[in-house]
Structures are given as structure tokens and as C-alpha cells.
Amino acid sequence: MSDKFVYFFGDGEAEGGANMKPLLGGKGAGLAEMTGIGIPVPAGFTVSTEVCTYFMEHEGAYPEGLDDQVRAGVSRVEKIMGGKFGDVKNTLLLSVRSGSRVSMPGMMDTVLNLGLNDATVQGLIEKTNNPRFAYDSYRRFIQMYSDVVMGVDAEHFEKLLEEKREAAGAKLDNELSAEQLKELVEEYKQVVEKHAGKSFPLDPWDQLWGGIAAVFRSWNVPRAVSYRNMHSYPDHWGTAVNVQSMVFGNMGENCATGVAFTRDPATGEKRFYGEYLVNAQGEDVVAGIRTPLPINTHGSPDNADQSLEVVMPDLYRELDGYQQKVEKHYRDMQDIEFTIQEGKLWMLQTRSGKRTGKSAVHIAVDMVDEGLIDEKTAVGRVEPEQLEQLLHPMIDTNVNAQPFAKGLPASPGAASGKVVFSVADAVRKVSEGDDVILVRTETSPEDIDGMKVSRAILTTRGGMTSHAAVVARGMGKCCVVGCTDLVIDYDKQRFSVGRDVFKAGDSITLEGSTGNVYAGILPTVEPKLDDAFRQFMTWVDSFRKLGVRTNADTPTDSATARSFGAEGIGLCRTEHMFFGEERIDVVRQMIIAETTEERKKALEKILPMQREDFVGVFKAMDGCPVTVRLLDPPLHEFLPDVPEEVEALAERLGIGTDELRTKIKSLHEFNPMLGHRGCRLGISYPEIYEVQVRALFEAACIAKKDGVDVRPEVMVPLVGFKSELAPLREMIVRLAGEVLEEQGVTIDYLVGTMIEVPRAAVMAAEIAEVADFFSFGTNDLTQMTCGFSRDDSVRFIGDYLDEGILKNDPFETLDTSGVGELIRWAVENGRKTRPDLKLGICGEHGGDPASVHFCHEIGLDYVSCSPYRVPIAKLAAAQAALNDD
């Protein structure tokens, strides 16, 4: 740990820069960098993340020497800003803000107006000749400090404020007089005394150290922990603390504050975009209490005359110059905050702006075209998960539905669900299997868990830079904000729009790209991918080394995956072809057969069904490999277990109900996932696999005669021993030879196995003697290696994540230190036996970016994932390859 804890910035000098995010956090590094390039930033200093780590490890203690460095920092701020902290005549007020190395909007705490007390507020009045401003700042400070530092619920203060407004006949805070605000200050102090059990601290230095400690502690508040877990940010990073001179946007009509983006964060359009408020503090812009105004006239015909560009044209031009400067400097779209105090513009923050998937791709492509970045930077800048937003369904344009309300289009896509009004209800309903839409007056960081599980978010307040909008865009969730037509009644669990009333549990649909809100569930259509997406994916493909296939079982799924760029099928689950209504009874007839002849007779009906499906899959994947897994699940999964369904099936099959019940009972297993399934079925009932193999190769011949380039790969599941795979391979080769000879066709094919049993991974060198390829079935391999049931572990995995026992759910992100080591062993030893052994994974991990990086690292040939995850896997593979450079 360094003995330097405090890093100063101000008046054109800075002790840090953009490359120091791990130490100064994103905010501190940004403030230092802006100062260094000549942007007007209020002077301040950053207390490093190392101090946060020390604070956490030493039960709230600070390292020796920090006090002296903080006091020296305050002294430098005083000299530059022309005030003195705690002085009753010329007081300097400070802000204390958090700053992780990555943006965590609203997750940690902030304290503004720090340094106010009964004496300094009088000095502020004399200095500004504005008692209303002074007392408004004081009452805001007491509320914020008491909530953040002393744990007094903000609702106590909000209740008093509402009562004061009602008594004064005022709708907004800024309509209260200085005397009324002064009364609130005294009432707020009484609230603190009552609920905190002690007086509000009046010593400015006590306030400062209380604020610093609160920000450090906020690194571990539940909402911040939840946000970190959601984005896989490490706990040890910690947060920096930024102590900065206050500047005020609420001192009068020549003051303002705002939030802006150098490009449109929703669409990526190259236009300066943002919102502001005259005579307001920063939190007013995003809180939704007042309706924010646009900063310029572009795209805002309704209130263009109130834009900053019109109201304060000179300051707007200055701001426009700064936004261009920071974007060009950082070579990325920036999210900036600014304040205008008595006609002087101050820049408070710049950081890489959160953006939708569409915006991310468009900005990356445009910046390459503009010469700001190169193609490698563009590919590395888009997060793989963001691409999923581009693939989400949209409302079918043929639907003639009229919205009952309209808000601001904060985050695109379309989603339907049942209305819920609280985080608790959202989490509960989702756990019961419902899709929900969280409806709130406005969201706050406390709502993060509810936002995470909801299909979409709808708020009545807030603008495009509100908490709901920013967080939803980061999550890739549909979001509509500022829907002022809605009137929410939390007590009665309903909202109304005019005479229409919607209760909790009613279904609605949101369209995040238009801001429309509809009643009921509307049909959706698949999105169309534009030229920017196609150009971006061309760059992705040029950099990646890892192949990307898809898990698809039907011609339709295969065609969809191919349209997204899949390079073949890594897993075609033949059992999924059996579940159609017209097919399932034929399969059941085969299962209940008492003799081999009866079984073969039923299988003769199945053969043409499978052959037809295989032909369609081969045609959809013309020129690409198709890995077909032979029957894998235990036979009982195809049979009903509800008494009424058993009786109906017995009648359809022409057998007695008791006879069918006896057969079903005979197939019962105590642990079927480790029982009679996979290759074990093929050995016990070879006729099942024989029919599947014949159907596969007959289909390949039909497709090839139609001009299709077929490349079949036959995969035997659940192998644990070479002696299991060897005879089944012989059968496959024999039947393939017979079919090809009958049809007079030559086709190259492979025979391999799915590595999903730990023993198979350990004995890879031996099994590779009879396998042309390994496909790692990481779902079952994780289940068997960890001893976690993938069906039941959901009951405790959450506890494991909360307690830090696991960093990730091993069924979502590959356990690289355990399961991954088995895969690594199998790769190395399998290729010792067969250097040309083809290797891939086909579990759900194939679409998880972190798992894809691991697959690249250990030298797999490909990953396979669901169709809609193909672009995500491709981008992750490209970024893994770029990391090698």
C-alpha cells in the first residue's frame, strides 16, 4: 500500500489521470483527466481505493497520515476556490461522492452541501444575499447527511416537506419561502434527535469524516453488492472518495444543472443529447420531481424554446465545445454532468456513457468511420451481452393496438408482464414463474433487485437520464419513464390513466423504443439487423479464432441460427424431435414394447419422421458440420405420470391401463439422470440407435443428391468407458457404410462422444482412440463434478453466492478451476492420442462470455450455444483473441 492516500485536482493541475481508475476510481480519474486537459472543474481531491480496502479490513480505521493529507487537500481547495471550510463569513462547502473503477449509477452514497451549520448558513446568506437558497441547501444537507451517514430514513424528512408544501399551498420545493425552509431545518434536527438518538453534528470536520466513512461503507450496502454480483465486479476493488468544492445550480435564474451525453445513448445517433433544469441541484434532474428540459433544439420541437441552447446560448456553446473536446480526448461517447453557477459553467464529471446494444454497435462503427478508433478498439468496446438487446422481439406492426399511455422511450425492446408495484412482489412473482413489469413512481438504487428480475420497468417520473433509464439501459431491459398519465395508488395496488384502472396482476406491454404502454399481452416479431450490425460482426469474425456453432433441433431453429452467423450445429438433440403431438405416441409404443420385434415395428414408424427432420437440418446448414446426438434421456421421460393421461394413453395404444401403469413403474429409477440413459440405452436396446443412425445417413444422402454439402457428425452421449463407445462406433460405421452403399453416395463423417462423465474426462487419452471428436457437455459435467443437481440447486445456489462460497452460478458461468480443469486435462490428453481430435463444448456455457474466453484459452475448436446467443459468443471469442495481442 502506498503512503500517498490523497490525489489533488484543480486550477489546471492534477495528481492523477485517466489511467489510474483502479486507484482513483472512474470519477476521480475522470476529474483529474478533465483538469489536465483544460476543462473547468471545481477543485477537490480523491481519497484512493486503497484507503477503502484498509478501512474495510481494519473495522473502520484509517491509515496513519490520512488526516494530515486530507487537511492539506482541503487547504489547497480553499486557496483555489476563494473560500474557507467552516468559516462563518466566507464558507466553502464540499461534496463527498463515491467512485468505483466502473460506473455503478446510484449504487453508493453521496453527501452534498457538507460544511453547513447554524453559523455558516448565516455566512452563506451574507455571501449570496439569498436566504432562500441558503436554507434550502441546509435542509437538503441535513436530510441527505442524516440518511446516508446516520441511518435516519429519508421518509421522515419527506413527510415533513410534504406537510410544509401542503400548508403553504405549494406544489414544488422551490415555491417555499426562506422562513418556511428555516422552519424545516429546525424540524429536521428534531427528527434526527428522535430517530438517531443524538444531535445532528454541527462541526464541519466531524461532518467531513462522517461523510468519507459513509461512502466507504456504502461499498457494501445490499444494493451495491447486488449490482456487483449482477455484473461480476470483484468485491476487493473498493471505492474511492471524491471530496470537491460545491458549486450551485440553484442560486437563482442564472444558475442551472444538467446531465448530457455526447451521443444519443439509446440509438447511437451522433448528436449532443441531454437534459437540464434552471435553478436546480443535480439530483433534481434525475429525480423526476420537476420535468427536465432539453439542452438543445435538436429533436425537441415541443419545448425547444426552453432549451439551454435558447435560454443561455453563450453557455450552451461553451458546453458544446467541452463535450466535443472530452469525446475526442477519450475517443468514446461520454456521460457528462455540469452546473452553471451565476453564469459560470463548471464540468462536474465525465465518464464513458452507458448505452443500449444498438447504440453501442452504432457508436463503435461510426467512430471507426470517423477515424477516432480502429476496428480492434470497436470490437473490444461492445460488451457481448449488449448484442442480445438487438435480437429481442418487437411488437408486431400488424397489431392494431392503441396505447393507453405514453412515456419517454428510455431503453428499447418490447416486453409484456403482470403489473407489480414493489421489489418484494417482483421477486416473489418471478419465483412463481410469472413475467412481471415493475411499475413505480420513480426507481431508486434500492429497487435494483426488482429491476433485475422484471421484464421491463415503467415509471411516472424521470427523464432519459433518470435512475430507471440509466440502469435499465445497462441491463438491456425495456424501460419507459416519465409516463405522467399514470397515477399510482400503492395502498390499493393499482394505477389509473383517466378512467382506466389497472390492478396488480393485470398484464400490460411496454414498447421501449417508442414509450408506448399497452393493455394486455401483444404479439411480437423478431428484430431486423441493420447494416451497422452486419459491419460490426464482419470485424468480429475477422478477429476471432474460435468457431461458433449452435444448439438446434429443428430446421427452423437451424435457419435462425444460420442467419445469426452460426457455423454449424454443435448439438442436435434427437429426442426433441420426438415430442410433437403426432409423434410422441409412436415413441411411447416403442418404449412399452415387450419384445425386440415389437420395438422394431414401432421404430419403423419413427425412422421416416427423423429422416425428414434431418433432411431439413442438413439443408439449413448447407456446407456446415451438423453434430447429431443419439438418444440421451431415460425412457420414462416420454411417458405420462398423471393418472388421467395414463388412462388416455392406454386407450390410444389399445392396452390395459393397469398394464401401462406396470410398465411405467418398471421404468422408474431412483436417480434417472445417472441411470439407464445415453449410451447405456444404445447398448441395452441397440435397435433404437440403429434406427436413428439409418435415418441420419439416409437423410444425408437425400440432401446430398439435392446438392447440399452435408457434413454429419454422430455423437454418442454419456460415455464413461472406451468399452462403451467402441462397439457403438462399430455399429455406426457399419450402418453408415450400408446406407451409403445402398444410395451410391460418398459422404465424409465423424463419430465422437460427449464428454459429460468425469471419468471420461480423466480417461480422455484412452477414449480418444475410438473418437474423432469430443464435445464437452458442460451442463452434466458440472452436475456430476460438483455434485449439484441442476434442477434442485437453485434452492441454495443463491445462498452460496450471497455468502461468497461461489462467485458465479456454475450452471451459468463455467467453473474453470474445477470443471474447467477436467476439460483442460481431457483436451491435452485426448490430443496426445489423436492430434487431429476436434474439440468443442455444447453445454449452455457456450453462450456465456466468460466461459467462451476459457474455451479460447485452452484451445477448443468451437463453442455451441442457443441461436440467439450466437452473436454474443462470436463477440466474446473475438475479444478473447484480441486479449492475446
Image: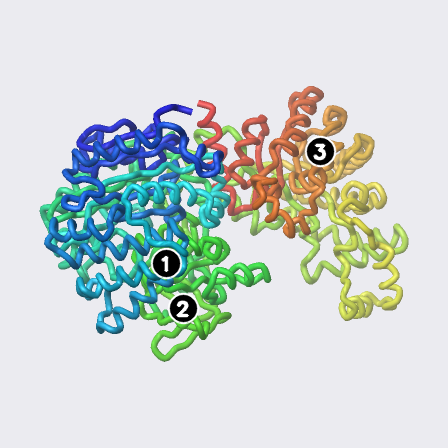
Q: What type is the residue that disc 1 sits on? A: Glu
Rendering quarter of residue 169: bottom left
Q: From this viewpoint, which residue is outermost toward the front? A: 198
Which residue carries the number 2 mark? Answer: 518
Q: Can residue 706 be seen in this view?
A: no
Q: State the separation of the CA atoms marked 1 and 2.
A: 48 Å
**Labels 2 and 3: the sequence-earlier one:** 2
Number of numbered discs:
3
Q: Examine the rendered structure and indicate whether residue 696 appears above or below residue 397.
A: above
Q: Quadrant of the N terminus?
A: top left
Rendering quarter of residue 331: top left
Q: Are marks 2 and 3 in contact (CB under 8 Å)?
A: no
Which residue carries the number 1 mark? Answer: 193
Name the side, left or right, on which 234 lies relative to 87: right
Between 29 and 389, the one nearer to me in the picture? 29
Q: Residue at point 62% right, 47% down?
A: 797
Q: Examine the rendered structure and indicate whether residue 457 appears above or below residue 740.
A: below
